[in-house]
């Protein structure tokens, strides 16, 4: 089995900031808006280099979405920046009416998603955002796994015509994806080959899935790990091809088990090749304050949880 290692950890929000900076140098239509969280979104360098293309809206996220929608009419490509909770839950009406319904070319960039926001607690740890965004017609939903992939995704969505929800996080996580890998929207990536179980993971859970696959290998279980960075449109082909070989699947995500990647996979399987599936996700609850590692352990969304789910799903084959 292919082994993945890393030499550095970095937060995925820095991947967004660096990707945005690169876009500022190469695409004059890219503009950025922020709701009073420039430092948290790592937008400082873009602002320094492009002060006339940055708009500080303040703590007025709904206004930010409306302004961004309007900017697209003049050919601009607006990137909005705030926490995932404020990027979705607080402004859902504006996104639905002004961006999605109108098919505006707005890039909704959402940091501090999921439980790994950590000590800020349940009020900020949104676990419903993927479901909210993927149900909007025409909305592309992307959840990259590390710094390199987040940077590549940020650059790629500028070329995509239409609204995008880009989700990333606060904690420093291993960098294990190649820094020169092309980011293809809607195309999953097979990271390891396996014959006994398919593990389909997204975001921070991709690294946990790789760690789980090594533990499983030690137990004599061959796991095929797939990185699904684009949740909508979902790469159904890569999933169906894998489960045709393995006969069962575990989905892994830092999100509520309702409405996320796991349910999209279940729908795909139900319509094509029904096989046993187990879900590694938050079990319909809010989070709480704690370190990312503590929360991932308590809410069963780490490598240990994936190993347990694999052992369970294989018995169901």
Image (spheres, rainbow, N blue to C red):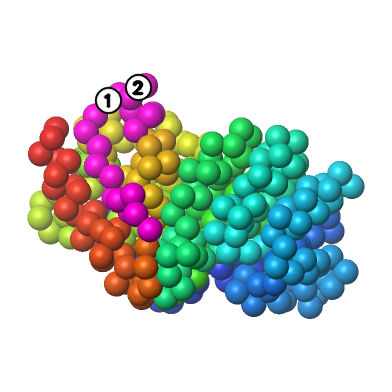
SS of the residue under disc 2: loop
Rendered residue at 71%/39% (across/down): 97
Q: Which residue is mark 1?
A: 274
- Give the distance between the C-alpha atoms of the residues marked 1 and 2, in whole angstroms: 6 Å
| Residue 291 visible, this angle | yes
**Image position of 45 (left or right of 242):** right
| Residue 191 visible, this angle | no
Quarter of image, res 5: bottom left
Rendered residue at 47%/64% (across/down): 123
Question: Which label number is shown at residue 139?
Answer: none
Observer-nearest residue: 296 or 287? 287
User: Is 222 covered by the magenta stretch?
Assistant: no
**Image position of 44 (left or right of 219):** right
Residue 63 image point, x, y percent? 76, 56
Is disc 1 in contact with disc 2, using a CB cutoff of under 8 Å?
yes
SS of the residue under disc 1: loop
Residue 232 image point, x, y percent? 52, 39
Rendered residue at 46%/50% (across/down): 128
Quarter of image, res 239: top left
Q: Which residue is mark 2?
A: 272
Q: Mark 2 Cα within 10 Å, few/some/many (few <14, many 20+)?
A: few
Q: Which residues are magenta?
A: 266-286
Quadrant containing the N terminus in the rendered view: bottom left
Quarter of image, res 259: top left
Residue 237 image point, x, y percent? 42, 31
Rendered residue at 55%/59% (across/down): 85
**Against 158, is 275 above or below?**
above
Residue 121 image point, x, y percent? 43, 70
**Image position of 77 (left or right of 235):** right
Q: Mark 1 Cα within 10 Å, few/some/many (few <14, many 20+)?
A: some
Observer-nearest residue: 46 or 72? 72
User: Is 273 covered by the magenta stretch?
Assistant: yes
């Amino acid at each position: 089995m292919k082994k993945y290692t890393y030499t550095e950890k970095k937060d995925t929000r820095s991947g967004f900031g660096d990707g945005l900076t690169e876009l500022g140098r190469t695409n004059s239509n890219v503009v950025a808006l922020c709701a009073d969280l420039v430092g948290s979104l790592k937008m400082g360098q873009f602002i320094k280099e492009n002060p006339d293309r940055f708009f500080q809206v303040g703590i007025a996220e709904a206004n930010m979405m409306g302004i961004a929608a309007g900017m697209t009419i003049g050919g601009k490509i607006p990137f909005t920046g705030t926490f995932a909770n404020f990027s979705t839950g607080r402004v859902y009406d504006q996104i639905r009416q002004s961006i999605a319904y109108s098919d505006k070319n707005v890039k909704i960039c959402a940091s501090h998603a999921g439980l790994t926001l950590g000590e800020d607690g349940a009020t900020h740890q949104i676990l419903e955002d993927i479901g909210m965004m993927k149900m909007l017609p025409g909305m592309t939903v992307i959840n990259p796994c590390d710094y390199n992939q987040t940077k590549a995704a940020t650059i790629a969505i500028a070329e995509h015509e239409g609204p995008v929800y880009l989700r990333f996080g606060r904690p420093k996580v291993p960098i294990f994806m190649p820094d020169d890998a092309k980011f293809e929207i809607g195309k999953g990536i097979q990271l390891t080959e396996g014959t006994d179980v398919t593990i389909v993971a997204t975001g921070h859970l991709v690294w946990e899935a790789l760690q789980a696959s090594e533990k499983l290998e030690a137990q004599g279980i061959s796991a095929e790990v797939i990185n699904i960075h684009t949740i909508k449109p979902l790469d159904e082909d890569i999933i169906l091809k894998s489960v045709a070989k393995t006969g069962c699947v575990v989905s892994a995500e830092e999100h509520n088990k309702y409405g996320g990647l796991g349910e999209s996979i279940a729908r795909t399987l139900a319509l094509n090749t029904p096989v046993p599936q187990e879900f590694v996700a938050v079990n319909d609850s809010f989070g709480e304050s704690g370190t990312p590692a503590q929360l991932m352990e308590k809410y069963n969304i780490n490598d240990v949880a994936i190993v347990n789910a694999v052992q369970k799903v294989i018995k169901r084959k």
